[in-house]
Amino acid sequence: MKKSFDVALAKQLEKRRRKEEIALEKQYEDATEDYIVAIYFFEQYHSPRCWLTANVANEVYLELKIKSETARLGAVKEQILIRNLGLGWEDANHPWLAVGHTYNLEELLGHLLEVVIPMSSIRDIPLEPPMNVPKMPAIKKLGMISELATDQEKISDDKLVALKENGWDEKRMREERGEGDGWAEKQHLLAPKMNKLKGFRIEMTFENTAQDGSQCLAWYQGTIEKILNAKI
């Protein structure tokens, strides 16, 4: 009976362990997707897309008025998410909705100008995007650390490194397939004036025929030398 009980208990523990492993792997998959999103917002902070000062924010905001209310709302939300998801500043977050209330454009803009933008002057800018991944719990140590705990901590660190590499690789492969464009996401929201385009570096995509006869896209970079047909 004891042997039978030990076998049944071992099977139960193995099933439980496997169930926890599957749940953990799912968490790492979700964390990879979150990390890719964080990469885009992190890169936007270090690009012309980001409104680093209140003066720049007001200037771009006013010029976006000629487009639409939706464009301005999307731009303000993006600036908040750049700090919240791209830099990992949780206190930069602001809900879009509340019970019985939808925050309007003025409320979100006020939060951006008064709370979010000033954060950059009082805290360090992270050197890489944040990672929302499961970690080993912090527990008090009594005596020597067991080899099992050491191994689990090493596995956790290795998974973090692998997750970073997978995130960057997946982002690159998606862009090669035409799913997203990191350069476009980092561009200024406002197009430059026609009379100031000379000297600008641009990138355009062209459809080419591969060696096997299939159609593929290729990006080419260049610099504007002169304007041939400018609309006034």
Image (cartoon, helix red, strand yellow):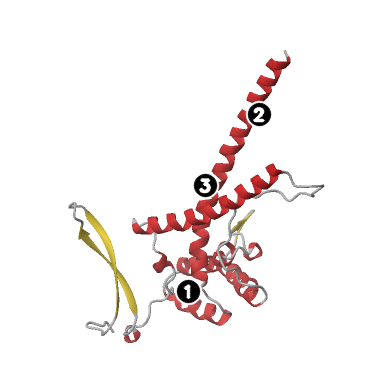
Q: Tell me the amino acid under the disc marked 1.
A: Ser
Work out whether mark 3 precedes mark 2 in sequence or the reverse, and give the earlier one: 2
> Callout 1: 10 Å neighbours few (<14), some, many (20+)?
some
Question: Residue 29: percent from the left, percent from the top?
Answer: 52, 47
Q: Which of the 4 image quadrants contains residue 109?
A: bottom right
Q: Tell me the amino acid under the disc marked 3.
A: Glu
Q: Is residue 160 left or right of residue 168?
A: right
Question: Residue 162: percent from the left, percent from the top?
Answer: 52, 52
What secondary structure is marked by label 2? helix
Question: Residue 15: percent from the left, percent from the top?
Answer: 61, 29
Q: Tell me the amino acid under the disc marked 2.
A: Leu
Q: Between 11 and 49, which is closer to the camera in this rendering?
A: 11
**Quadrant showing the N terminus:** top right
User: CB atoms at circles 3 and 1 under 8 Å apart?
Assistant: no
**Quadrant showing the C terminus:** bottom left
Q: Residue at x 27, y 63 (%)?
A: 218
Per the rendering, the mark at residue 47 is 1
Which residue in the protein does label 3 denote? Answer: 29
